[in-house]
Amino acid sequence: MTSFLEQPSRFLFFTGKGGVGKTALACATAIRLADAGKRILLVSTDPASNLDEMLGVPLSQRPTPIPGVDRLFALNIDPEKAADDYRKRVVAPYLAIWSETQIAELREQLAGACTVEIAAFDEFAELLAGDEQSVPFDHVLFDTAPTGHTLRLLSLPRAWSGFLQSTPSGASCLGPHSGLKMQEARFVAAVDALADAARTTIVLVTRADHAALREADRTSGELEALGLKNQRLVVNAVFEATNRADSVALALEERGREALHDMPPRLQGLPTTRVPLRAFNMVGLPALRALLDDRASAALARAVPPLATPSLPPLQSLIDEIAAPGRGLVMVMGKGGVGKTTIAASIAAELASRGHDVHLSTTDPAAHVAATLAGELPHLRISRIDPAVETKAYVDRVMATRGAKLDEAGRALLAEDLRSPCYEEVAVFAAFSRTVSQARSSFVVLDTAPTGHTLLLLDATGSYHRQTVVGDVDAQHASGRIVTPLMRLRDPQYTKVLVVTLAETTPVSEAARLQADLRRAGIEPFGWVINSSLAAAGSTDPCLAQRIAAELEQIRVVREQHAQRLAIVPWMTEEPVGPTRLLALARPSE
């Protein structure tokens, strides 16, 4: 089962769709290698990292020894801390020679969300580019952010190298180029290490699920185009029913079998490892050691007596309240892989079926809305905020307006600046703002990106809010009339934020952190949705029964500690794709 560990490369890079178990597999692999006598560094590049919780020890940006596992060290690359350090490094040389106004302008240039990404990659690249003296470990394992963020991260060195080579003058939205050129050689070395099959293995993690396999196939192709060809596939949580009379267990097994049978050709050609679904949550060293060890897994399994299932409120109870005003914005948020897209599509379909005009859109780079809806409904239209399309439209618009007032040299400088990868954030935010404003007269349901990306988006919203209300003199005098996107998100009459999670320890903890982040931004979630609940579906299969017992404990935690309102969506024996099945999620009694 651990064939990808027979001759491991120096760098192991775990990536894949959110929620497929990348972190658990990265931790289990790191523990296995450390137990075999290797000196291991485990690194998270995920802005929403949960390594701390899984390993049971607080982590920082420095390697921390893991109690209970000799020779294993772990660290989190904190994007915000990396960005703060990066800003100080860029600003420092100019403090003594520039005016306060110039320094303020430079700090404003460095305030964008893209600075966070490039600074995080700077930390990441240092590990990849280092030799065994500067990075004294036999193997370095990277637990990456969800797929869309990871691909953007990996494209940054190439994007910035090209930008730096083509824009020798002026300053980008990351400040003066001198701040970046110091790192250019490191970026090149990092890309070389990633592309070197002798040094790096890309471990594509997926599940026996059509959507997850499609995402893995797309990721594989895009990574190959970036020159990362040494790939292996791990299919996590493959389930085989023990109780052959249990309809839920048989349906879960059959759905996985069908998905693996229909696996895309590219993935079929990769060396593949299958890891069984385990009965326990992947938190703590015993569980992580057992993930890749059948004997240890059997020792952790336990019999569960019949459980009394409590009253579980359906999704319809939330939709009834959302529908009452006849219009509004619904933002569906949460960790990758919890089923945000399915819940967003189900809510949109139900609202449309009641005769409301509904716009279902996504800010998620992975964008599975159309595939999930897989059909048409009256009163419902769908769209995607596509970063490439929005960036081109933004650049064309700026060149046609600001550029029209410039001479040829000025237009050339403007065109250089607009080639910066940072302008993608600006363009996506503008599209997001337009979509949010439509909820004044109809329903807008936004399937948002995984947590890290979403928070970057909200940060951009907050920056826009500050610039509009504080930075504009006219706006200060007319602030009572200004309605910015952040104001709309804070208005509970306008916006309903739903936090989607699974009834598992780590997803619930991450959802709670997301709720805390939203509250710091002045946004109060309307309610929580626990998706794909086996407790709501019911099963007597031994493996599933143990998981149901753990689910009920997490449902209790959500109910008592986190959610103002709560809905439980059962795991469905048929994959929730298409209008009929999506409507069934919202109408559990039918």
Image (cartoon, rainbow, N blue to C red):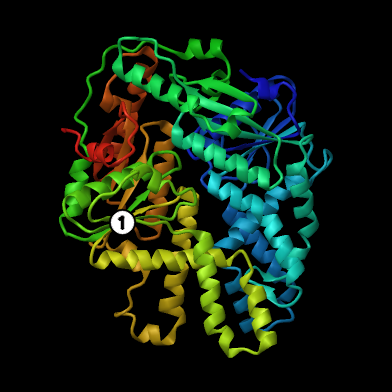
Q: Is residue 377 above or below residue 586?
A: below
The quarter of the image holding the N terminus is top right
In this figure, which residue is indicated by the disc labeled 1?
381
**Any part of residue 50 in sight:** no
**Displayed quadrant of residue 534:** top left
Q: Position of residue 286 (x, y in %)?
A: 54, 20
Q: Amino acid at mark 1?
A: Arg
378 or 6, which lies in front? 378
Q: Position of residue 100 (x, y in %)?
A: 63, 82
The quarter of the image holding the C terminus is top left
Q: Residue at x 61, y 83 (%)?
A: 101
Q: Residues within 10 Å of mark 1 (few under 14, many from 20)?
A: some
Q: Position of residue 202 (x, y in %)?
A: 66, 36
Q: Residue at x 37, y 18 (%)?
A: 544
Q: Secondary structure at mark 1?
A: strand
Q: Position of residue 32 (x, y in %)?
A: 65, 22
**Any part of residue 436 in sight:** yes
Is residue 494 found left or right of 47 in the rendered image? left
**Displayed quadrant of residue 475:** bottom left
Q: Is residue 30 above or below residue 436?
A: above
